[in-house]
Image (cartoon, rainbow, N blue to C red):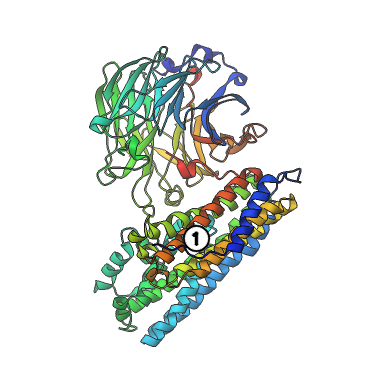
Amino acid sequence: MLLALCSTNMLSASKNSLYWAGTAKQGKDYLLIIVNNKGQVLRKIKLPSRGHGLQKSVQGQIIVCGRRPGTWMLLLQHKDAAPHWIRAAVNRPLSGHCCFSADGDYFYSSENALEVSQGAIGVWNSHSGERLSEWSSQGIGPHEIQLSSDGMHLWVANGGILTHPNRGREKLNLDTMESNISYFRLSDGRLIDQYTISEPQLSLRHICVNKNNQVAIACQYQGPNYDRKHLLLFINDRQIDYLPCDPKVILELDNYLGSVTFDISGRWVAASSPRGSRVVIWTLAKGMNANQSHTLAISDACGLSAYYEVGGFIISTGTGRLYHYAAPTKVLSVMGSANSATEHLLWDNHLAKTIIPPHYQ
Amino acid sequence: MIQSHPMPILVRLQLALLVTVSLVTPSLSYANPMVTSDHVQAWVNEYVVPSYVALHQANQALQRQAHQLCDQVSLQALNKMQPYLNQALQALAYSQAINGGPVQEQLRNFHLYYWPDRTNLVTKHLSQLLDQPSSLGWQQYDLSQSSIAITGYPALERLLYVPRYRQLVMLGKQGPACRYMVALSDNLLRLTTEITDAWQVNWRQQLVGPRDGSSMFKDQNDKNTFVFTNIDTLLTKIINQKLAKALTSRVSSAKPKRLESWRSSQSVIMLKANAKGLTDSLNLTLKPALIDANEEAKWDTIRLKLSFIDQLIEQLPTPLMVSLDEPKYWLATQELRNQFIQLQGLLQEIYPSLNVQLGFNAYDGD
């Protein structure tokens, strides 16, 4: 039940009080940036190192994960709250993303269990920051994790790539890598379902979930660069398949999708390729039926979040831009041109995903 | 004892002085330098389009030679064709300060020049191809559908320079190698036709035409970023691929066969063409921007660095492949790489003042 994802505050939120959060680089500093509906910067918090995944809870909390080194998390109880820094557990470097439980009382982190070279999911109290437990992620290199639409399960993208904090960006198992999407019951961490594909070097890394518990999966191909692969998969009704994609667009995506999100209706999907400077938009009909709607060309576009309108998205770029995009009318407009752009904020891969207001449930 | 390569001391002194002056002298300008639409237009018209036209013309000449050679094949004719390939490789290297745009679309960059070839794919696929008796009818074969390892210059280089493949070409018009060579030269020409057409029809318009919402370039900053991203990409490629892989960390472990186009002894010539492409691009864009903003000292630093790089390249032996594992030349090549690193660093310090953001996720995403 997606209602569980909605904050009481959000029920009466007017457009002007909305905000988005993302990580960015400014000069040599890495920052958490909170912007308002006009793209104006409301708050900046300096991070110890590069931030990666981040999410908002229904209570308005924000969690940010560090990456390389995955040694810290930043928890804010609300956008103006004092920073609460949380250390990763010993021998459990963070491997990308965190996500909140439906009520916002817990959060989960994707991690590497170094002693067994396997993935783990950490379970934390999101008020005290205390670590409560962990489960196996049932794969190697878990990356993005997202709550199911009923709020009682967790989707985990096990990217399949083994890394180690002492080996930097080196990928240690490209010849043997296997990626999967695992589906867990939150109450006990039990594996309910697992999805794999017959393309071993395709790393299933980023996911988003809509109100029908359909999952869009953005991949990165680890094979040779000239060998271009389909990069967007979709899980519906326990089936996994590729979403249709024009072969020309597949070439343009450069084997790399950096982020994926649904719009608030769950009927539009946007996936970004910063290497190809493209954002691809799909529309969903019933079941697995989907159409690749159109493609946008935007330099170094990566961060994506839903905007508060059907087919609306926020797009951030590594060249310092923040855009609003209305997919139904295909209108792209710059947000915050007088603010964030002139501050030389280079937006990192992700924006916090939007909490879905109730009238779209 | 390893001896240091003799460096032009005067140039070094000039450089050191200029760097010092530019760092300690307060700038007389009141505004940041600006790369304008006129500068980008000049870059497109005077560098980008001419460089692809030159490459296309080199491919036309190459194609003519390939057809003639297979009509009357001889060792002499085979040797006579080599300079045409060298000319094309040089033109390609000059154009490499443009990495984006049509050359990247449809994987044309790979089709033209599959390098670096870490797993020796060109040789493997070429051997498979030419050892197969079924490889008849190459003239009709559509190479755009083949492995990219064997659709471009590296395969042609082997046919013209490697004895085993030369022997196969010598089988004449009816031999598969000769027919394949013709198909290769046709394919190269097709690729550069597509690139030059795409620049004329679409990309030129996007960069120098009126503002268009569907363009990847939303404003002048995006266009400037495109120009300098191309420059930075080539510098990174020179530093990390063209030089680092062959140099390795020690002279004793140097790997000369990691140099590009070593079979045709074009490694140094291609570096020289790369440097010219960089110099011409910067002359058309950065130079006027800095000079207009009274930042001559900064430009002089860049200019001298480019000049020093040219001198270092001139002093490298050709073919470098046979000399790279000699301490003297290893050090000279290492010094060249250091100078490219410094050039890249100098430029990256200037980019923020031009409001150019080189991108972030495209290089370092996750």
Q: Is residue A266 above or below residue B267?
A: above
Q: Quadrant of residue A156?
A: top left
Label 1: few (<14), some (14–19) or many (≥20) C-alpha neighbours in 10 Å? many
Residue at image position (34%, 58%) is B118
Give whichever of A51, A255 is nearer the camera: A51
Q: Amino acid at mark 1?
A: Leu
Give whichever of A59, A44 is nearer the camera: A44
**Figure quadrant of the C terminus of chain A:** top left
**Figure quadrant of the N terminus of chain A:** top left
Residue A279 in sight: yes
Callout 1: chain: B
Residue tagged by mark 1? B336
x, y (%) of residue B66?
42, 79
Disc 1 secondary structure class: helix
Give whichever of B125, B243 is nearer the camera: B243
Residue at far front of view: B1
